[in-house]
Amino acid sequence: MHTSATDRVGRFLEGETIPLYIDGQWQPAADGQTIEVQDPSTGARIAEVAAAQAPDVDAAVQAATAAFGGWSELSASERAVILHRLADAIERNTEELARLESMDVGKPIGDARGFDVPFSAEAFRYYADLAVSTRYREPLALKEMAAHQLRVPYGVCACIVPWNFPFMLLAWGTAPALAAGNTVVIKPAELTPLSSLFLCELAAEAAVPAGVLNVVPGVGEQAGASLAAHPQIKRLAFTGSPEVGRMVAAAAAANLVPAKLELGGKGAAVVFEDVDVDSTAQALVDAITLNAGQVCCTATRWVVQEPIFDRFLDAVRSRLGAVRLGSGIEEATTMGPVVSEGQRQRILRYLRDGQEQGASVLAGGGEARAPGYDSGFFVNPTVLTGPAENVCVREEIFGPVAYMLPFKAEAGAIELVNSSQYGLANSVWSSDLQRAERVASSLVAGNSWINAHNVFAYGLPYGGVNLSGFGGGVNGVQTYFDYLRHQTIARPLA
Ligand code: NAD
């Protein structure tokens, strides 16, 4: 099974250039531009993919526009059958997708196999089932009027995806849109386009009609910007940084198109003195090493009650010692490289700037070499402490870095957490569940978790406020309705 998966991945990558997927066809970019995809554990080239420009994006939008009529006219059940078939194909190719995701992003293959891929398949199943059980026509009880409200799909939706969870974020953006009867044009991140392109092979196998799902990798300022600004897009879902989010929101606003923005974060974990120190330390080390810390909602500020600060730090140090750096594709690796040399330099720069502003390194720190690798984009997981006013407390580093801050009493912890401009996700750790609930509800963010961090389920809405985004979030029932517009039909009876 694994051998055939390796073979299929090999065949997928072996061609000269992996083309764009437009209207059910593989097509080169109109001007022949390409992007090199690198293995983050060595920097070596894995593949070359076509880089879409404005004319390619336009061709994809035209294909999606042409496909909209047929796709939206299918019944919800007919679309659900196709989306379940796509989920079946994803599950059958779990190993292939996990390999591609691991090679491309650098993440441990076990994580991709156990989470990224199956959780993505589940997104298609969840929204397919929701589509079947939704009422698309609601009678309106009005005096002297026969009236009802319809829920109808918008048309072509754009989905712009970052590089940290390429496959899963694609699924979060496109599954509800497709289930609702919209067609999609997906722009994966230039660093990590492979699993999105492989999905196109699976879409063809699952007989997703041509033009319903189009994938146009390319550079953000070119492919991304022309997709966000395209006048035929009816809805937009963007996941990425606040800086680019602002540009995408401005492009959507110019066309008066509703946009979902899922942006960065600076998550905190509030650790009270009554926790089990060992298991909490393990959970937070797991949080900062997951995907080498490149997780929008992860726990980057550890706000720890004074009496256990030193004990907690000791427990963290011993667990960090067990982290095994290596290529994501090696089964024994527990933390892979970061995605690119640029990202590695960004993290190292933050560590330097943070220390210049008074932070000190409590554990780990800086450049790393994985055993057996003389290159690659590795960094050590790092725990800092220092003044609360520090660039590493304020800004999103997007690497395996946590900043420990002590607190005395509940109110002080809440104030520290809420001093952030971000508002994505935080966690509260305590054996006093009433206190945990009280603190969780005082934290200004889209998501508060209790005695766990990075908690996801379909049916559990996930989204951010302030710098972390707007537009309704993902993964909930409401997300499905966000992809359906309202239309009322009314007939006066008098
Ligand atoms: P990014 O904003 O640089 O890029 C995201 C996507 O936008 C990429 O596909 C990129 O090519 C494209 N893009 C770049 N410039 C563009 C432009 N001018 N117009 C249109 N598209 C453009 O983000 P990144 O570095 O890929 O990802 C990291 C960021 O994503 C972090 O801030 C992280 O917190 C955030 N993120 C948020 C969530 C969430 O659910 N809230 C999830 C994952 C990542």
Image: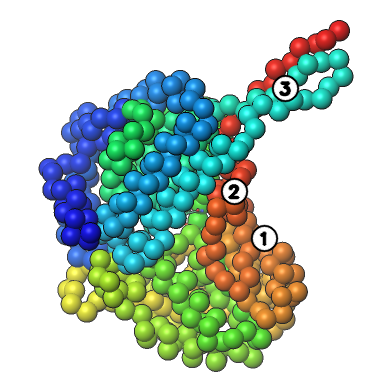
Residue 236: mark: none
Q: Is residue 98 left or right of residue 10?
A: right
Q: Is residue 25 above or below residue 284?
A: above
Q: Residue at x 48, y 46 (%)?
A: 125
Q: How far is mark 2 from mark 3, CA to CA?
A: 25 Å
Q: Residue at x 55, y 49 (%)?
A: 475
Q: How far is mark 2 from mark 1, CA to CA?
A: 20 Å
State the residue in front, 392 or 262.
Answer: 262
Question: What's the residue type where badge 1 is placed?
Answer: Val
Q: Is residue 254 visible?
A: no
Badge 3 marks a residue whose secondary structure is strand
Q: Which quadrant holds the N terminus?
A: bottom left
Residue indicated by mark 1: 444
**In front: label 1 or label 3:** 3
Q: Is residue 184 left or right of residue 449?
A: left
**Cβ at disc 1 under 8 Å from ligand 1:** no
Residue 148: mark: 3
Q: Position of residue 144 (x, y in %)?
A: 86, 15
Of mark 1 and mark 3, the one earlier in the sequence is 3
Q: Is residue 402 visible?
A: yes
